[in-house]
Amino acid sequence: MLVDTHCHLDFHRFDGDRDEVVARALEAGVSRIVVPALDLDNCAAVLALADRYPSVFAAVGVHPNSTALWSDGWIETLRELAAHDKVVAIGEIGLDYHWDKSPHETQQRALTQQLELAAELDLPVIVHNREADSDVLRLLEQSALRNGDRPGVLHSFSSDWEVAARGLELGYYLGFTGPITYKNANELRDVLRKAPMDRILVETDAPFLAPQAHRGQRNEPAYVVHVAQQVAAVRETSLKTVEAMTTENAACIFGRDLLSS
Ligand SMILES: [Zn+2]
């Protein structure tokens, strides 16, 4: 059994064959999929998927690229959305200085307030970080979010070991995606090699970041198996061990309900 801890299953690119995508995931042993929201508009779609598919769980939050019009009142809406019984995290939230779609100050304000909400609700966070290492670490460090010392996941981790080590110290898990299978990803595989096994999660970030075996195609949850295989290769262990560890890690962070239903 595997958990794809990050997949945008609500995207239009899945409209034509969403049932088949979920079925293929189940056939591949991917029996849980966590779908994070990106803004207040798609939260409803994400929660509808969680209602429709027993294997789908949800996170609600506002992605940094969607914070340009951030209003403090959005927290109240997120609080209401988070009451849904299949919401397992606040996400995805963070900072993105690459696309720069919202002023840095606004992104930071949205991240800080959503970290506060997660702390209040005792939920973990799914953190997006693009070219914003030091500000992300600073805001996570300042946050009161502990969630039983499992505050969240640094999703699709792509920074260096120094950032990983600091995140691990703060209690964060590292989410690994398709890029660990790319030929030029030696630095990332080095981070993966050094990270404690009990802090590693596997994710697809589908429809993006297809693993090497499917590069150029639409990614989908079934392909998280390729990520797990790469973890096994780098860690010189069996796929079975990686499946067991990462599934246990997902339950530790997102809660036991993830596996019980
Ligand atoms: Zn994402």
Image (spheres, helix red, strand yellow):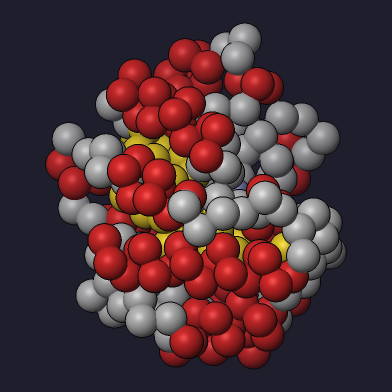
Observer-nearest residue: 156 or 247? 156
As drawn, 59 above or below 142: above
Q: Residue 180's image quarter?
A: bottom right
Image quadrant in which you'd find residue 184: bottom right
- Give residue 6's position: percent from left, percent from top: 51, 47
Q: How many discs appear?
A: 0
> Can see residue 103?
yes
The vertical placement of 186 against 2, above or below, is below
Along the line of sight, the residue nearer the viewer: 118 or 179: 118
Q: Where is residue 50 in the image (x, y as percent from the top left)?
A: 35, 29
Q: Which of 121 and 189 is in front in this view?
A: 121
Instruction: Residue 190: tell me if it is visible.
Output: no
User: Quick one: which residue is furthest to the left in this view?
Assistant: 260
For the C terminus, give its image quadrant.
Answer: top left
Residue in the image at 47% along x and 35% along y:
43
Left or right: 122 in relation to 139: left
Residue 173 lies, in percent from the top left, at: 44, 71
Q: Is residue 243 above or below residue 186?
A: above
Residue in the picture at 39% in, 70% down: 116
- Seen at 66% across and 81% down, the residue is 135
In the picture, which quadrant includes the N terminus?
top left
Residue located at (55% from left, 33% from top): 41
User: Image check: 16 left or right of 43?
Assistant: right
